[in-house]
Image (spheres, coloured by chain):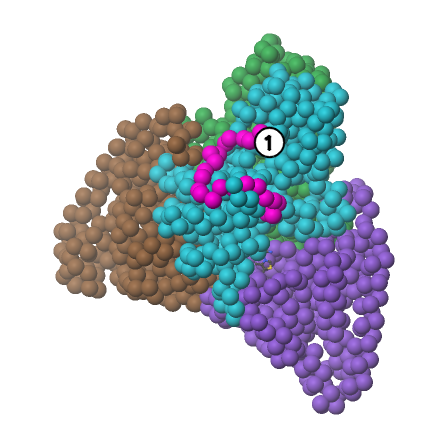
Chain colours: A brown, B purple, C green, D cyan
Amino acid sequence: MQLSRDELIRAYRDMRTIRAFEDRVQEEFSAGNIPGFVHLYAGEEASAVGVCMHLSDRDHIASTHRGHGHCIAKGCDVEAMMKELFARQGGLCGGKGGSMHIADLDRGMLGANGIVGGGPPLVCGAALTAKTLGTKDVAVAFTGDGASNQGTTFEAMNLAVVLQLPAIFVFENNRYGEGTGHDYAVGSKDIAGRARGFGLPSVKVDGTDFFAVHEAAREAVDRARGGGGPSAIEVQMQRFYGHHSGDAQLYRAKDEGKRARVDADPLASFRRRVTESGLLPDATFEQIDAEVAARIDGAVAGAKAAPPPPAEALMQDVYISY
Amino acid sequence: MQLSRDELIRAYRDMRTIRAFEDRVQEEFSAGNIPGFVHLYAGEEASAVGVCMHLSDRDHIASTHRGHGHCIAKGCDVEAMMKELFARQGGLCGGKGGSMHIADLDRGMLGANGIVGGGPPLVCGAALTAKTLGTKDVAVAFTGDGASNQGTTFEAMNLAVVLQLPAIFVFENNRYGEGTGHDYAVGSKDIAGRARGFGLPSVKVDGTDFFAVHEAAREAVDRARGGGGPSAIEVQMQRFYGHHSGDAQLYRAKDEGKRARVDADPLASFRRRVTESGLLPDATFEQIDAEVAARIDGAVAGAKAAPPPPAEALMQDVYISY
Amino acid sequence: MPSKSIRQAINEALRQEMTRDPRVVVIGEDVAGGQGGTGSLDAYGGVLGVTKGLIGEFGASRVIDTPITESAIMGAAAGAAVTGLRPVAELMFCDFLGVCFDQIYNQAAKFRYMFGGKATTPLVIRTMIGGGRSAAAQHSQVLYQMFTMVPGLKCVVPSNAYDAKGLMIQAIRDDDPVVFFEHKLIYDHKSEVPDEAYTIPFGEANLTREGDDVTIVALSRMVHFANEVADRLAKEISCEVVDPRTTSPLDADTILESVEKTGRLVVVDEANPRCSMAADIAALVADRGFDFLKAPIKQVTAPHTPVPFAPALEKLYLPNPDKIETAVRAVMAD
Amino acid sequence: MPSKSIRQAINEALRQEMTRDPRVVVIGEDVAGGQGGTGSLDAYGGVLGVTKGLIGEFGASRVIDTPITESAIMGAAAGAAVTGLRPVAELMFCDFLGVCFDQIYNQAAKFRYMFGGKATTPLVIRTMIGGGRSAAAQHSQVLYQMFTMVPGLKCVVPSNAYDAKGLMIQAIRDDDPVVFFEHKLIYDHKSEVPDEAYTIPFGEANLTREGDDVTIVALSRMVHFANEVADRLAKEISCEVVDPRTTSPLDADTILESVEKTGRLVVVDEANPRCSMAADIAALVADRGFDFLKAPIKQVTAPHTPVPFAPALEKLYLPNPDKIETAVRAVMAD
Ligand SMILES: Cc1ncc(C[n+]2csc(CCOP(=O)(O)OP(=O)(O)O)c2C)c(N)n1
Ligand SMILES: Cc1ncc(C[n+]2csc(CCOP(=O)(O)OP(=O)(O)O)c2C)c(N)n1
Ligand SMILES: [Mg+2]
Ligand SMILES: [Mg+2]
């Protein structure tokens, strides 16, 4: 636990921002204000933040359908994100992508992805760019336990090892892919172990422990930047909400999600550890919580005030214009 | 080495038939008598035969572009095979498949495959049929070292473990996928080890040693038939010819293929061991060789005499007829 | 006759065929939903509930949940089909074909031909199509044209519950690979559906409206829009609406007969325009029905763009009755 | 001007662009050929030698051999393209799209639109098409129609060496994903090709024959057959041959102008007929060129079957000059 005061504050602020964003999206979605589908990241915050704190805008990440947390951790503007989810002008993708394709190339965020397993091959590409141009940048694929079984994910791991790419595969094991349990879908019942079989240095960490994730990610990022090739990290956590907002969650024991909020809350454990060890006072946390709440309120207000995309947008950006 | 005399004779006869078939195909192809492309199996015989000796017509195999050996080991008629390669009537597929899609459903041979990694998912299906209908049949995917890197192959291994299918993945590591070396293309440099990471009992055997392959296959087949689920076997061998007939083989040291004929000939080592241990006399081998040579001569003569498919065949068998 | 939704009709077809034939199995992601979880094994029944309840009746050995592994699912289904089962495999959204298309179009579709007629592949692939739910570019596509293109695949695009049941039973009993496209916006559409099993042959179009002035050929959800336009214009322009029900085989005769009568054709297809079913049908008539034509053939399709997320844009993207009416008026003016 | 084959022309285009721009890399299976082997690193240069010699000039960091892993190849190329490289990725045979199509049509093709115009994906995918070598059902297909269908992809189908070079350089400099279809039967076809770099814009058709009676639109290798027929019939029937050179964007204007002049159209496409480019072009003209038409629009395509192995059958399968002549005579008779 060697983070500076500023780093601790940033870590908590980012995690709290994700939590507040997702809780609010759940509300707004339930109220019918957000079209389409949303998959919420609440409970998984330590993974996105613990990893992305080691990255700059020049480093790339590829995300999943559950992408809001990765966006925020990678520095995307929350108001522009909220506008995107609300399908408004000023949205990160001009309202054309939505939750499932939210992206911000300027922040090195290569997009949420509607295709499970879509991201890992792309990350090989971002890492190949870094390697070819000698930039020392790295690229991270966030991938679910479900997505860990997709052929594209396996291929990407193998290619990353073959080409010794500065790529990191973060497997966010939140126990389920939709309604299917990870221990059913992962034949070996060991995602990190399977990655090790591909030749990747691999570790398994407790995703409710921000510091564990942060440390594992530091090693992997340092290895990649130093030319040591790819790594894998399996982060074990629980999602508080259903697969998507509105999911009846019949595949789960009735109170499983609720219990996770008590037993497996990375924010609570972070705050407990940091206050107990006297690194930051409770007041700082309360202040951050308040700031974040205001920011999210502002983002939602901004989104609600923004107009929908103009009709011309339909035909724009299929191809570049000359 | 607990094979009966008849089994020893069958093993050698099948291997010799493959060798003679391939050597003759090479000749006929070079002479312009065979259209398309052919990929020859010479040097790899112990794999197909060592595995298929444990199988009956009810068990299924899926093969690769290098499929003649698997056909012969699975009991396909060599004259019908030769006719198929020559694109003649009476060919196993009526001349519509050719070397790359030669198949014989009656013998449980699900086809050579023009798509690298095409076979393993199909084998999950054959194994699923066996499991669902409770037949105790098994299914075997023959797969190359190159194909071992394809996503479809990885997915098939995982699914086989998840559903505990009676499936066996035989990785024929002949060192190259086209011109690319296995130690380059397999990031972990260990195909069997990677399969183990998927949760499959996995072994690596010397593919020039028929008895080693036969024994490893026996274990895997027994496990599958007994309800013990899937296994993987990596068989290490060398191919005597190039990737396809006509390949200049510039990726290989000049005499590598030629040396393999001396150092890594599964037929020679079989004969040596069997004669040295007094199980069969030299005369038996000579007799088999002569019989096989005559059979191949007959197959080629039959193929050359057969007419090409009739014009109506073009539009037949796209769909079943009612 | 009892009124049932398309969802119910398909569920019933599956249930009846699974009861009749023990070789019929359902396989896919969350087709039951809940394996390895702490709750119910019948948690999903497919993400939109079409296979709900089947696991209770037929058990996990015939309603098979899989990992997220579409190539292995399609391959396993194809391999099972050539070796003795009659699998109904689910490709959750047709948009996902890109991770598993090989097993469909190079393997299952080609077995019979490549193997000289010796393989039989009685496989059904169920998949969802269509926009209208703001599901954006990767969950809203209509890709039946990519499958229709492939020799060896039969393609079914039901527009109502009666057809859905009869065509699904036909698909399961058919000895060729069949891809069954379910439009997610019409799952709740109801019509009268007999309780007993029945089949509808492939390649027989349905005239949902009879008329003399213009032929409208429409597919899947678009049939409802075409009907609406026919009804709306009934006093002015007499529209005949043809629902092909299957795109492969396609009932060319019914389309040509209709155009012979009307002399005018509008084709309505939710897909992007290039190499689409709209183009396919237009090209058919521009050859074999040319002599009947009194006006240019108009196509009403989505534009050549991905599906946008914003509802405001998606509405502009999708074909709708107004666009169809405009096309009908255009061919009448010519 | 020096005479060069299509193979040489593409090789030269790659070499010149790689020299000009260090961001251009070539990636694929055996694009050099020999990594991890005991012989030469330049053993293949692609299975038909198109990238031969590049590794010697640019090294293994820019001519990147991969495992057999098409999804990862296409994904890596797409991901590299949005992050600063300009990759030329090889999909050895177009038939293999089924194991990697997602990364092409759902990822690379859609980035720009889904991300609101903020991504640029300067990616070229080279792939081989075509029958005629008895390579059978999984190595002989012509699938440009599946790519043409996809908004966001540009599709190039060169028929000669001059076009191949100019279109390849254009493709590499283009900021959108481009799929470049090389017909394996015409790699050795030679024409005059300048040594220096030049580009040919997309969406500009080439009239390879001028004529007044019939328009023949033909693609890739089919252009040569169409030219042959035009020459063969020159004294009887005056054929205009249009080579679109790119199917997306498609030069509709040139096609329509030609049909305006001739009043008759034959489209020649090696693909299977359903939802094909032949249908696409026929449908275009049946709408926007209807008033010019004096006869039905005929399509000359492969039949709706997989590609058979036997040379005797493959010959019947493929379009050829005789079939084109028959179609031309049919539209003249009408
Ligand atoms: C190729 C593909 N298959 C299936 C789906 C449907 N789907 C969306 S999310 C999901 C579950 C993903 O599980 P996991 O990777 O564990 O991520 P999580 O949702 O738990 O974050 C599935 C099956 C999809 N979008 N893409
Ligand atoms: C999907 C796909 N990619 C590439 C190819 C081209 N190809 C045919 S065989 C081959 C090499 C296969 O290597 P391996 O699996 O080791 O089998 P081997 O040839 O050594 O028996 C390649 C790349 C193909 N047929 N299919
Ligand atoms: Mg999960
Ligand atoms: Mg090999």
Q: Secondary structure at mark 1?
A: strand
Q: Quadrant of the C terminus of chain B?
A: top right
Residue bounds of the magenta highlight: D186-208
Q: Which residue is mark 1?
A: D208
Magenta stretch contains residue D187: yes
The kind of residue tagged 1 is Thr
**Residue A89 showing in the rendered view:** yes
Please give the name of the residue rendered at 33% of the width and 44% of the height, measured from the top-left corner: A105
> Dot 1 falls on which chain?
D
In the displayed structure, A54 sits above or below D179; it is: below
Q: Nearer the viewer, residue D286 or B199?
A: D286
Q: Residue furthest front?
A: D1
In the displayed structure, D252 sits above or below B66; it is: above
The picture places residue A80, in percent across and down from the top left corner, at: 29, 37
In the rendered structure, the answer to whether residue A272 lies left or right of residue B78 reads left
The picture places residue A265, in percent across and down from the top left corner, at: 30, 55
The picture places residue C95, in percent across and down from the top left corner, at: 52, 42
Q: Nearer the viewer, residue A266 or C52?
A: A266
In the rendered structure, the answer to whether residue D22 lies left or right of residue B315 reads left
**Residue D147 showing in the rendered view:** no
Please give the name of the residue rendered at 84% of the width and 66% of the height, measured from the top-left corner: B298
Q: Nearer the viewer, residue D297 or B304?
A: B304
